[in-house]
Image: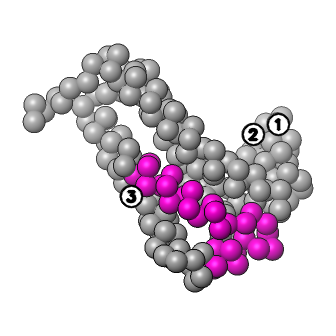
Amino acid sequence: GICLMVQIITGLFLAMHYTSNTSTAFSSVTHICRDVNYGWLIRYAHANGASMFFICLFIHVGRGIYYGSFMLNETWNIGIILLLTTMATAFVGYVLPWGQMSFWGATVITNLLSAIPYISTTLVEWIWGGFSVDKATLTRFFAFHFILPFIITALVLVHLLFLHETGSNNPSGL
């Protein structure tokens, strides 16, 4: 919960200075790091906070597997949806600085969807907003990156609701 709140708060501060335009996205990130007071700290807290978030998430999943929490179907399934949504949020966030790694990461990963039969071309072009990764893609990814953490927060509440429906205890007795 703390990791999620830190990510949302630092993300909101970063969004105040970020521009989702292919010609200015990289320079806006540079501006945040160099010209905004403590912008470098906020950016690196956000970037490294994502890694901490995943470490906590993987420990949580590992604990769930160890103690057999997967037997609680609703709670476990919401948890898996949370994991996938968090991975999607991290991926679209990785694209936002719009460096070479960001551009080619977006190109390669979104092209993986072209392996889906029948709908692949339509799906990839919808995500791209055209026929290649470009301005529309960056704008869409910024919108997804902005809204998905709030969806994750709602899913966490549903996850906790199902957890308290089935009963929560510490199996080791500590």
> Looking at the picture, which amino acid does disc 2 mark?
Ile
In the picture provided, is 149 more to the left or to the right than 172?
A: right
Q: Can you say whether 57 is above or below 37 in the image?
A: above
Q: For the view shown, which residue lies furthest in the front direction?
A: 37
Point out which mark residue 119 bears.
Answer: 1
Give percent across and percent down for residue 91.
Answer: 60, 55
> Magenta segment: does it hold 69?
no
Give percent across and percent down for residue 159.
Answer: 42, 28
**Sequence-first disc among 3 and 2:** 3
Give percent across and percent down for residue 141.
Answer: 71, 54
Secondary structure found at label 2: loop
Tally the numbered discs. 3
Quadrant (top left/top right/bottom left/bottom right) for the C terminus: top left
* Disc 2/disc 1 C-alpha distance (Å): 6 Å
- Local packing at callout 1 (Cα closer than 10 Å; few below 14, some 14-19, many 20+) is few
Q: For the view shown, which residue lies furthest in the right direction?
A: 131
- Local packing at callout 3 (Cα closer than 10 Å; few below 14, some 14-19, many 20+) is some
Q: Residue at x 57, y 56 (%)?
A: 12
| Residue indicated by mark 2 | 116
Q: For the view shown, which residue lies furthest in the left direction?
A: 174
* Disc 3/disc 1 C-alpha distance (Å): 35 Å
- Local packing at callout 2 (Cα closer than 10 Å; few below 14, some 14-19, many 20+) is few
Between 116 and 87, the one lying in front of the other is 87
| Residue indicated by mark 3 | 52
Give percent across and percent down for residue 143.
Answer: 70, 50
Chief secondary structure of the magenta portion: helix
Q: Residue at x 58, y 64 (%)?
A: 14
Secondary structure found at label 3: helix
Q: Can residue 132 be seen in this view?
A: yes
Q: Say which of marks 3 and 1 sits in front.
A: 3
Q: What stretch is highlighted in magenta?
A: 3-31
Secondary structure found at label 1: loop
